[in-house]
Image (cartoon, grey):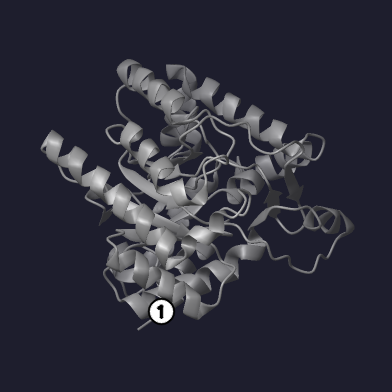
């Protein structure tokens, strides 16, 4: 089916608006996974037959591969993602307030470079509606059998000096419904958001969110939820290490490397050139090397114990393996699903299993950071 998607599904995308194609794909996955018969068919086709367990954030993940934020902002296809074999799903970005995002068109494909450019602008239903939607979903279907993450964004109209209140409100509303929270201070599509990567901005957000996290956990007699920070690739290694140290010292439980980039590669095809001049964040294959280098830099500087999540240009098992060797505990994909289709999960997990068997390691946990020592 992976070959079938590349031969038939991917060429059809060329005739569709990128955002509309994205929406149709989500709707199709939600529909196909909503019926027990078609759900079984999806499992047979796409779910990995191999387990590569790794424990992190208090959960046992069946393997290290999950869905990155941006693909399913409003959690419309949760059953579908689990059915097709992902180990975890990150919804969002979710903001305190509902917002429509930036004017359309705002998503563009560069097929020859296997890259996407988007300037979506945190379009989502808002934390209240998403809380209600998840509550209804859980009552009907139960909680997902895999960890559910949520990417927290800042509402566009919220001033930077009140950003901590925005992030905190979403965290509070979704706390009991989600397992891991990712504080996104690095999207290039919300004006001035990346200014929150400074010590002052990041400290304020983390302190406020940790206070809410601790208070709710104490009230429920449970453990606090993991809080991660997602940062941009457009910085020097010195800046990256400084931000990572700041995040860790302020209590962040890990870091996501990385968000989309505002830099552009040299295009090798006229169609890609027309996409690369569009404003927004670039994801996909051109981000792969930078993301992996960031992972290696942070793992070397911070040490072996702080979880790093690798995302950026993961489109096959080798990409994922390289990020794990560099120091990623888990890896995610977004653009990879656009260009490789739903078979990506099985391809990556089975490929990782083959590489693990051929290596000197006995578990994926042993592979993490093995190329930094």
Instruction: Return the residue at label 1.
Output: 371
Q: Is residue 66 visible?
A: no
Residue drawn at (44%, 27%) of the image: 130
Residue drawn at (52%, 42%) of the image: 158
User: Quick one: SS at disc 1?
Assistant: loop
As drawn, is 321 to the left or to the right of 31?
Answer: left
Query: Where does residue 172 sit, x and y in percent of width and height?
Result: 31, 36
Asked if 20 appears above or below 198 in the picture, the reply is above
As drawn, is 207 to the left or to the right of 159?
Answer: left
Count the marks: how many? 1
Judge the density around disc 1: few (<14), some (14-19), many (≥20) Cα neighbours within 10 Å: some
Query: Where does residue 286 sit, x and y in percent of width and height?
Result: 66, 64
Which residue is farthest left? 221
Query: Where does residue 91 sit, x and y in percent of width and height?
Result: 46, 39
Front-most of 46 and 62? 62
Front-most of 350 and 186? 186
Asked if 39 appears above or below 238 in the picture, the reply is above
Q: Quadrant of the N terminus?
A: top right
Q: Quadrant of the C terminus?
A: bottom left
As drawn, is 290 to the left or to the right of 279?
Answer: left
Front-most of 12 and 357? 12
Asked if 182 appears above or below 104 in the picture, the reply is below
Residue 106, quarter of the rendered image? top right
Which residue is farthest bottom? 373
Query: Where does residue 304 sit, x and y in percent of width and height?
Result: 29, 73
Front-most of 49 and 116? 116
Q: Is residue 345 visible?
A: yes
Residue 179, quarter of the rendered image? top left
Asked if 373 appears above or below 195 in the picture, the reply is below
Residue drawn at (30%, 36%) of the image: 175
């Amino acid at each position: 089916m992976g070959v079938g998607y590349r031969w038939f599904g991917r060429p059809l995308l060329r005739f569709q608006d990128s955002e509309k194609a994205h929406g149709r794909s989500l709707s199709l996955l939600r529909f196909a996974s909503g019926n027990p018969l078609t759900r079984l068919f999806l499992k047979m086709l796409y779910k990995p037959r191999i387990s590569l367990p790794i424990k992190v954030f208090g959960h046992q993940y069946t393997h290290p591969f999950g869905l990155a934020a941006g693909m399913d902002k409003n959690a419309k296809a949760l059953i579908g993602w689990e059915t097709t074999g992902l180990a975890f799903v990150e919804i969002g970005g979710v903001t305190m307030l509902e917002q429509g995002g930036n004017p359309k068109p705002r998503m563009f494909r560069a097929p020859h470079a296997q890259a996407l450019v988007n300037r979506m602008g945190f379009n989502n239903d808002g934390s209240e509606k998403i809380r209600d939607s998840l509550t209804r979903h859980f009552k009907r279907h139960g909680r997902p059998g895999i960890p559910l993450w949520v990417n927290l964004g800042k509402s566009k109209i919220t001033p930077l000096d009140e950003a901590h209140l925005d992030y905190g409100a979403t965290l509070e509303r979704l706390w009991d419904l989600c397992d891991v929270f990712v504080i996104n201070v690095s999207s290039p599509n919300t004006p001035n958001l990346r200014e929150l990567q400074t010590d002052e901005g990041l400290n304020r957000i983390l302190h406020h969110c940790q206070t809410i996290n601790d208070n709710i956990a104490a009230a429920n007699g449970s453990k606090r939820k993991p809080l991660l920070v997602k940062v941009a690739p457009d910085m020097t290694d010195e800046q990256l290490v400084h931000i990572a140290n700041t995040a860790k010292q302020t209590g962040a439980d890990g870091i996501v490397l990385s968000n989309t980039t505002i830099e552009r590669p040299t295009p090798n095809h006229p169609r890609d050139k027309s996409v690369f001049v569009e404003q927004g964040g670039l994801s996909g294959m051109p981000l792969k090397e930078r993301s992996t280098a960031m992972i290696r830099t942070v793992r070397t500087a911070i040490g072996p114990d702080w979880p790093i999540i690798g995302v950026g240009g993961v489109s096959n098992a080798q990409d994922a393996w390289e990020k794990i060797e560099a120091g990623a505990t888990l890896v995610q994909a977004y653009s990879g699903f656009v260009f490789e289709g739903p078979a990506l999960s099985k391809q990556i997990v089975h490929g990782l299993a083959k590489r693990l068997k051929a290596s000197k390691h006995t578990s994926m946990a042993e592979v993490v950071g093995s190329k930094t020592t």
